[in-house]
Image (cartoon, rainbow, N blue to C red):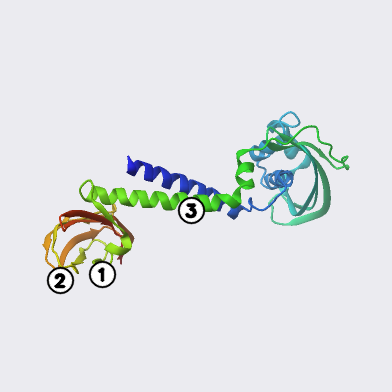
Amino acid sequence: MGEIMGKKIIGCGLVALFVFLGLVGSGCVEPDDPAVATVRTYLEAKNTSDYNTASLVVDSKYQSKGYIMMTWTRVEGTKNKRVENADLSSAVSGNQAVVIANYTETTYDENVHNKIGEENVTQYFGVTNIDGKWMITKISTDPLPPPVATGPVKKTLLDYITDNAGFLLPAALAMLAVGVLIDRREKANKGGAAGSIMIQTTQISRFVKCVPSRMGAGSAGTVDVWIKNFNQQQYTGVVVTAAFPDGVKVNKKKLKFGTIEPGQTAKQTWTVKPSASGRFSIHDVTVAFTFGGKQYAGALDPVWLQVA
């Protein structure tokens, strides 16, 4: 149950984090005019004669996909034209907006290689927020009157996310950290017996070391696992387990050290054979043992194999 919970928390944290990073990367976290974005999408679609995309931002009650295709093909001849240097500005009132597009329309010959004409164009777009999405409802070469709201703007899920973007990143990172901690503890429990006392990774890495050898694709290599007993009592029932990637064969996943006396250093070895060159991760490296009559377990960081 704990492992499932840990994975769920990790999943939620990653989703929230990726959404936040996606918004930052796309510029959506910064205040932007969605009406302008709608018109820009339309003009970019026009450059590639992408009727499908254009129909997604034009209200079908104003122009259907078939109408857009006919107009672009037979009337405007957009196949041999390109919209360049578009400068867009807008006026918004509630659920209504007017976007003014100033751009250069360049005309090419049939081979779309030689420029045969250039014209400065100004177009006016009426844009309406319909069920939370801004849609083009009017296109004109004549100026349109200032927009007058006819209703409120319906917020979408993206709007709520961007409105709270400042809180999303800390929450996502916190969820991810908690999930990783729970998941790591549960993985360690799987390696040891139920009820084991958990050891933090920073503590267990002080006396357990994994040292991979040099290796090439298709050739055998080794990963030496060293354990040093710095205490005054012996470790008993010492076992190290790990999960190996699909591209790496291993002779045995569980290394049994048995008893390690005080002051003693013990070594066991994984013999591995990577099938391809690259970087591979041995993960879920778990150490379990008994010390002073109590059972302990802990998880190490992944071990990376560099395969030539």
Image quadrant where residue 68 sits: top right
Q: Secondary structure at mark 1?
A: loop
Three-letter code, disc 1: Arg
From the viewer's perspective, is the residue at label 1 or at label 2 nearer? 2
| Numbered disc total | 3
Identify the residue under disc 1. Answer: 214
**Earlier along the polypeptide chain: callout 3 or callout 2?**
3
Q: Residues within 10 Å of mark 1 (few under 14, many from 20)?
A: few
Q: Relative to the observer, which residue lies in front, 28 or 191?
A: 191
- The quadrant the N terminus occupies is top left
Q: Relative to the observer, which residue lies in front, 296 or 49?
A: 296
Q: Position of residue 281 (x, y in %)?
A: 32, 58
Identify the residue under disc 2. Answer: 263
Q: Relative to the observer, which residue lies in front, 83 or 179?
A: 179
Q: Residues within 10 Å of mark 3 (few under 14, many from 20)?
A: some
- Going by the picture, which residue comes out furthest to the top? 61
Q: Do the numbered discs 3 and 2 sit on residues whose CB atoms are within 8 Å?
A: no
Q: Report how far apart the C-alphas of labels 3 and 2 lie in the structure.
A: 40 Å
From the viewer's perspective, is the residue at label 3 or at label 1 nearer? 3
Q: Is residue 107 visible?
A: yes
Q: Is residue 58 left or right of residue 162?
A: right
Three-letter code, disc 2: Gly
Three-letter code, disc 3: Leu
Q: Residues within 10 Å of mark 2 (few under 14, many from 20)?
A: few
Identify the residue under disc 3. Answer: 173
Q: Position of residue 296 (x, y in %)?
A: 22, 55
Q: Secondary structure at mark 3?
A: helix
From the viewer's perspective, is the residue at label 3 or at label 2 nearer? 2
Name the residue at 21% across, 60% down: 272
- The quadrant the C terminus occupies is bottom left
